[in-house]
Amino acid sequence: MKKQQIMGLWDKLWDGIVTLHKKGFFHIIAGSTLAKIAGFVSVFFLPRFLSKADYGLLTYVNNIQSYVMLFNGIGITQATLRFCAQKGDDEVKKGYFISSLKIGIIADIFLIVLTTAAYLIIPFPYEGAKFQLVISSCLPILYFLFTDIQLLLRATFQNQRYSVYNFTYSFLLMIFQIVFAVLWGVTGVMIGKYISMGLCVIMGYLLIRDLPMMKVKAVKLSWQETKTAIRFSVVMLTASATSTVMSYNETFIVGQLLKDKELLAEYRVAANILSISLFLLEALLVFILPYFIQHIGDRRWIWDSYKKLFLINGVVMTIFHLGLFIFAKLYLFIFAGPEYMGAVSLVRMFLVASWIQAVFRGLSGNILAVTGEEKFNLKINIVFVVLHAVIDIAAVKMLGIYGAAIALIVVYFLSGLIMNIHLRNICKSQIGEINHDEK
């Protein structure tokens, strides 16, 4: 009997693996892994090619750019994912994609003008920051085009092409950033970004031009449809911005309160572990979110699928994070060098925050966002971004850079707990109604 049960479980496992392979899951995992490896080399080895002061300057400039990128294209790329992933005519899907391109480009032109003017007027605490921000001010429009094409590939389940595109971007960014950093320091990093993004936009066009939806004539969206797409995008942008801004706020608060380039560089190197620790979650989300979008309104399917994903994701992430926790010293030695070995404790604190994000917060939050609960996400994220800033300022003043990690742990746990409870409540309420009607 036990042998039969084991064989039955094995058959189910094998069938599941075969199904995932057919749907392109392993293409996404492989592509995401290769992309992250390339990204790690770029991010983690840059400190070896720049002085500690220059790396601190790059961290400060990149952090300000991250705030600007939160408003990139007013978030219209999310409309591409949402409306092109739903079942419907290719003509309509192309209409949404073409509209997203037009709206995003116009929005970014205004963004570039406003930010360039601001960079020229505002004084910055670090020498050289103004120049670097001005020369990099046109990056948003290239990144918007790259992201919109990337999400179109996701929405149309072109997982193999998505993986190739994602890896190519990371690989080109790695090569050009490091090569030009050796030649021209921080300025070279910015030049490398322009070249890699520009090449990827051209490649993206080549990848999507033969898709079935690109061969039909686009339906021109009505004003009401356009408003719906923009409204959805702005809500998603605001929810995403308030969620991701927490980590940006930390870098800004540490930089402003401590005013030490070398300490800021040490903090950034430690926080970079989040890029490693969360890449498996990101790959999982790339694969599953289009399927959840297709089941909007089917709460029974959403809840049953989420429970399975939560269990599998929790086990994998616990093992993965435990390994990173044990080898924290090796991570610092390889990717940053001996001068950063004092940040071991900080790296491990960020891994605790990362585990909470990967298991409790990231999965539930993203599923809520794409299944009609984006306004709830927005409200929760606004509350917690304010709470995080208050805790972060107090903690950094008392505990230095360690306070930043503690603030992130507290806020990730509380917001993740609330998101899970809400997802359970909305799914259970509809399932209860369905069961009642069936009786």
Image (spheres, rainbow, N blue to C red):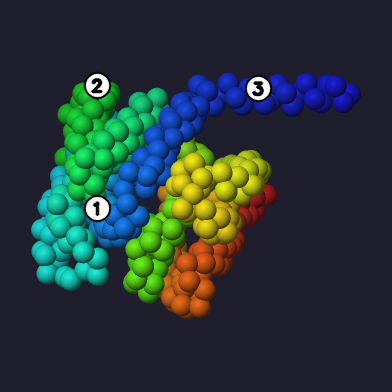
Q: Is residue 240 above or below residue 317?
A: below
Element type at mark 1: helix
Q: Nearer the viewer, mark 1 or mark 2?
A: 1
Sequence-wise, which precedes: disc 3 or disc 1?
Answer: 3
Judge from the rendering whether residue 74 lies leftward or rightward of residue 171; answer left or right: left
Separation of disc 3 and disc 1 at Cα? 42 Å
Read off the residue under disc 2: 210
Read off the residue under disc 3: 14
Q: Which mark is residue 332?
A: none
- Rendered residue at 47%/28% (across/down): 30
On-image quarter of the N terminus: top right
Read off the residue under disc 1: 72
- Mark 2 belongs to which amino acid? Asp
Element type at mark 2: loop
Sequence-wise, which precedes: disc 2 or disc 3?
Answer: 3
Q: Nearer the viewer, residue 206 or 301?
A: 206
- Mark 1 belongs to which amino acid? Asn
